[in-house]
Image (cartoon, grey):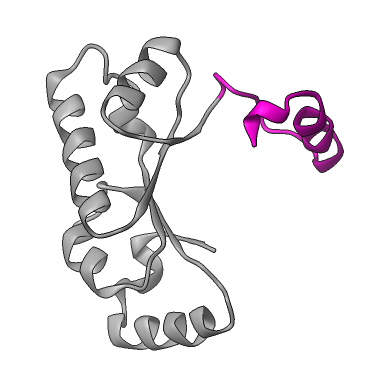
Amino acid sequence: MELTESVVLDNLADAVAKMNALRELGVRFSMDDFGTGYSSLAYLKRLPLTQVKIDRSFVRDIAEDASDAAIVQAILAMSNTLGLKVIAEGVETEAQFQLLQSYGCRFFQGYLFSKPLQIDEFERLLKDHDFLL
């Protein structure tokens, strides 16, 4: 299940309790748009997350902007240390993909790989390109 910080902002303790109950049922959680909120670091250590998604605003200019590159590297290092998977969203160019891989990112989302698809088109894509699995 993908969440944003705004979902848990109002009542963190209640959100954590509900997330823990759902986690016991096998639900895993991803923090979407990581790095764009006000208290991402505080939530990161308290929420029962499995993964974070690096916001596309940091990925977009990663090849040209040293600050974006540094932020992405910091998110990856911190997340890896905490045992969280990281997905880079908005990957549209080979340069972005190569840089992210060189920083240790292993999961990607974006138009470089495919536009959004209907489920039947997605299933065909998986069958035709088993390397995606």
Q: Is residue 50 above or below residue 122?
A: below
Residue 31: % across, % down: 39, 57
Q: Left or right: 28 with respect to 121? A: left
Q: Left or right: 132 with respect to 96? A: right
Task: Name the quadrant containing residue 6.
Answer: bottom left
What residue sits 83% from the left and 32% below the top?
A: 121
Q: Is residue 26 magenta?
A: no
Q: How many marks?
A: 0
Range of the magenta residues?
Answer: 111-133
Locate the C terminus and report the quarter of the image it occupies.
top right
Closest to the observer, 82 or 38 = 82
Task: Name the quadrant containing residue 10.
Answer: bottom left
Residue 54: % across, % down: 34, 41
Q: Is residue 126 magenta?
A: yes
What residue sits 28% from the left and 19% below the top?
A: 61
What residue sits 45% from the left and 13% below the top?
A: 93
Q: Left or right: 83 with respect to 121? A: left
Residue 57: % across, % down: 32, 31
Locate the N terminus and report the quarter of the image it occupies.
bottom right
Q: Is residue 32 above or below residue 54?
A: below
Q: Is residue 121 above or below residue 11?
A: above
Closest to the observer, 57 or 18 = 18
Q: Left or right: 62 with respect to 55? A: left
Residue 64: % across, % down: 22, 11
What residue sits 41% from the left and 62% below the top?
A: 50
